[in-house]
Image (cartoon, rainbow, N blue to C red):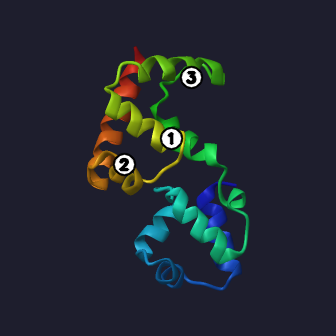
Amino acid sequence: MRTGQIIAKLRSEAGLSQSQLADALFVSRDLVSKWETGKRLPEYKMILCLAELFSVDPEVLIQKNSILTEELSALLPVGYPSDGETLKKDLNLFLGTLTERDRGVFIRRYYFLEDPSEIGDEYGIRANYVRTILTRTRRKLKKYLKE
């Protein structure tokens, strides 16, 4: 079961509407809907809040490495080898092509699972700019993997 389906199931079992869950987490109902439909994945800090709210272990909602898999799986070209070793090797080579800052942002997000605001604080940039860096880096990674 995917993260969004689990959130929807736990929310329903708790007798909460999407609006009530959104209010409890100080987010929009639209965001909760996007989580449940799989259009967006909650930040790991939000996973921790959801786990606390539903009194479950965070691993019930998502395994940490699932964030990496879900966000980056769309970048893999058709026919890309499914073994993790090939991806690991290609990813390490790709990271070597990035600037130190962009590499650090990427690693902090996908290895340490930090949210963009934490990463921004570390680099003295805004969270929105961190998201921009990540978007551009994913785009570069997709092109790199195609070649």
Q: Position of residue 74 (x, y in %)?
A: 48, 37
Q: Which residue is mark 2?
A: 122
Q: Around disc 2, counting alpha carbons within 10 Å, would you say few (fewer than 14), some (14 to 19), or many (20 or more)? A: few
| The disc label shown at residue 87, or none | 3
Residue displayed at 46% across by 63% down: 34
Work out which quarter of the rendered image holds the C terminus and state it.
top left
Mark pair 1, 2: CA separation: 15 Å
119 or 131, which is in the foreground? 119
Label 2 SS: helix
| The disc label shown at residue 133, or none | none
Mark pair 1, 3: CA separation: 14 Å
Q: Which residue type does callout 2 highlight?
A: Glu
Label 1 SS: helix
Residue displayed at 60% across by 19% down: 81
Residue displayed at 49% across by 70% down: 32
Residue displayed at 26% across by 48% down: 129
64 or 140, which is in the foreground? 64
**Which is nearer the N-term, disc 1 or disc 2?**
1
Q: Which residue type does callout 3 highlight?
A: Leu
* Whether residue 139 can be seen here: no
| The disc label shown at residue 110, or none | 1
